[in-house]
Image (tube, rainbow, N blue to C red):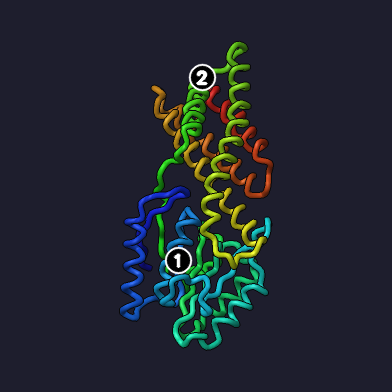
């Protein structure tokens, strides 16, 4: 299955590679070779949304695809961020009908990984027998949470996870202090260093939450201005929740990178390699706890204190 390169970020970036991806798809459309279902996957919901809207405008010949009568979409709603079968059935009915303006129809499933099983099965039938002159977009940052049968019936358009660092001096300082704490722990914990390690860990926890909230608030405020006016309050709440999780995921990725950097500073690479492997496992477990609504400070406390114990051992 073909893939195309793109460029993603939670914050403003150059769109050269992204434009190249869209150009390839537009060429396929012009030549009558565009797949009936496109699965846009990447790490940034913002980029997936912008790319989808750009191509949808081209397909519908409209300045604003979201207000076109032949544009249909469904998004997760409320903090549970689920897409139910009733919403999917409504989209299915709309795209089975004749186009209002006699041209193409476009349907978009935002955050398709949030489809409930019954909804996914209902949508699968549409993918198996797609309506004529219809293009279906599925947007997701978690493609492997989709049914394999759905993925297999779509053309994958991949926006790789290569992204800029989070542009925050406070966050860069946090990562530096985290690295310093690992270096201190690697020398071995004793009565004199233990209080410094513990206080340092709790300081990082408090700062992490504050930095994340400040970054998320500023970025969401700007991104919210770009949302279609047709979105309901429940859909906006769901999208904001997903947006915040996306930022936290990026922060965890940079913590993992900083952990690897700390391991490489050691003269004993065999020992530091074992420490690194265990620390990454702890970080992944903490991320998993957050996915089931574990409190953020508690998950970070688990990771940092457990990780420091790992680094303090010989």
Where does residue 94 sit, x and y in percent of width and height?
Answer: 58, 81
Rendered view: 192 above or below 265:
above
Looking at the picture, how far across and down is residue 29, in whole percent?
Answer: 35, 76
In the image, 76 versus 120, the foreground residue is: 76
Vertical placement of 248 versus 234: above or below? above
Left or right: 312 in relation to 27 = right
Q: Residue at x 53, y 79 (%)?
A: 69
Vertical placement of residue 225 versus 39, above or below:
above
Q: Secondary structure at mark 2?
A: helix
Circle 2 Cα neighbour tier, 10 Å, few/some/many (<14 / 14–19 / ≥20): some
- Residue 228, position as x, y percentages in the image: 55, 64
Residue 250 visible to an observer of this rendering: yes
Question: Which quarter of the rendering shows the N terminus?
Answer: bottom left
Residue at 62% x, 52% y is 241
- The total number of labels drawn is 2
Q: Nearer the viewer, mark 1 or mark 2?
A: 1
Q: Residue at x 61, y 46 (%)?
A: 288
Which labelled disc corresponds to residue 52? 1
SS class, disc 1: helix
Q: Which mark is residue 221?
A: none
Residue 214 shown left or right of residue 180 in the figure: right
Residue that numbered label 2 is attached to: 184
């Amino acid at each position: 299955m073909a893939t195309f390169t793109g460029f993603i970020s939670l914050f403003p970036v150059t769109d050269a590679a992204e434009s190249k991806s869209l150009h390839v798809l537009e060429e396929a459309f012009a030549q009558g070779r565009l797949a009936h279902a496109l699965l846009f996957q990447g790490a940034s919901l913002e980029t997936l949304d912008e790319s989808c809207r750009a191509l949808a405008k081209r397909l519908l010949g409209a300045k604003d695809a979201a207000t076109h009568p032949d544009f249909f979409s469904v998004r997760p709603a409320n903090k549970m961020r689920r897409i139910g079968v009733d919403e999917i059935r409504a989209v299915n009915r709309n795209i089975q009908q004749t186009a209002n303006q006699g041209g193409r129809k476009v349907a978009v499933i935002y955050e398709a990984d949030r489809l409930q099983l019954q909804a996914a099965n209902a949508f699968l039938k549409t993918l198996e027998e797609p309506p004529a002159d219809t293009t279906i977009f599925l947007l997701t940052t978690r493609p492997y949470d989709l049914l394999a049968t759905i993925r297999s019936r779509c053309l994958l358009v991949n926006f790789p996870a290569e992204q800029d660092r989070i542009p925050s001096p406070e966050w860069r300082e946090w990562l530096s202090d985290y690295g310093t704490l690992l270096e201190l722990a690697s020398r071995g914990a004793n009565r004199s260093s233990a209080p410094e390690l513990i206080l340092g860990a709790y300081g990082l926890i408090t700062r992490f939450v504050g930095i994340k909230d400040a970054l998320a608030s500023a970025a969401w405020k700007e991104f919210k201005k770009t949302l279609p006016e047709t979105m309901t309050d429940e859909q906006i709440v769901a999208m904001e929740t997903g947006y915040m999780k996306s930022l936290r995921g990026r922060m965890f990725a940079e913590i993992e990178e900083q952990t690897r950097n700390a391991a490489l500073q050691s003269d004993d690479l065999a020992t530091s390699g074992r420490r690194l492997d265990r620390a990454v496992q702890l970080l992944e477990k903490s991320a998993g706890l957050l996915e089931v609504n574990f409190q953020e400070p508690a998950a970070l406390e688990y990771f940092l204190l457990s990780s420091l114990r790992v680094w303090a051992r010989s």
